[in-house]
Image: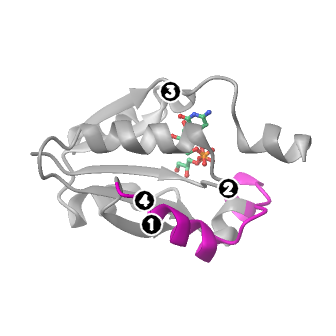
Amino acid sequence: MASVITYGTFDVFHVGHLRLLERAKALCGGDGLLTVAVSSDRFNWEEKRKKCVISDLQRMEIVRALRCVDRVIVEDSWAQKREDIKRYDIDIFVMGDDWEGKFDDLSDLCKVVYLPRTPGVSSTEIKQRI
Ligand code: C2G
């Protein structure tokens, strides 16, 4: 059993997000918990210069409704990850491999795992298509 955490915007939710979360949940083993930190609108715009189509409250509601997700928290700063890992007694930190290497500094607190992204789908590409 392992407790797992991952972070994301999850705007215009799509199968790439879903598969990442399902694979993160699979790392929990039998009855481990998956915590998902969803970026606030403020954080997205001020820190990531990402303008979301779907509000943070609705993105959190969608992620919370997924069978594979056990807990949803807000991501409001880059720096909160260390505190989150300690607060929720996290064993594994997971991100898609577009972030490969970016969070290795957390490896003194927990295992850091980068999973292959799902090719061919992104919120940006969907927004451009609409
Ligand atoms: N993802 C994926 N496959 C895709 C698209 C996204 O596996 N086709 C993964 C990303 O690698 C990430 C997660 O889904 O692990 C969420 O992606 P975004 O919503 O784009 O999150 P991002 O804006 O990268 O925010 O502090 C970390 C940031 O909050 C991550």
Q: Which callout, 2 or 4, points to the residue nearer the camera? A: 4
Q: Identity of the amino acid at label 3?
A: Asp
Marks 3 and 2, how far apart at CA: 18 Å
Residue 69 in the figure: left or right of residue 111: right
Q: What is the span of residues highlighted in magenta in the rendered image? A: 45-67
Between the C-alphas of marks 1 and 3, the distance is 25 Å
Q: Are marks 2 and 1 in contact (CB under 8 Å)?
A: no
Q: Which residue is mark 3?
A: 97
Q: Please, what secondary structure does the residue beneath circle 4 have?
A: loop
Residue 11 visible? The answer is yes
**Do the CB atoms of the residues marked 1 and 4 lie less than 8 Å apart?**
yes
Mark 1 — residue? 65
Name the residue rendered at 33%, 55% in the picture. Answer: 82
Question: Where does ligand 1 appear, by image quarter?
Answer: top right
4 vs 3, front mark: 4
The residue labelled by disc 4 is 66
Q: Is label 2 within 8 A of ligand 1 (CB to nearest ligand atom)?
A: yes
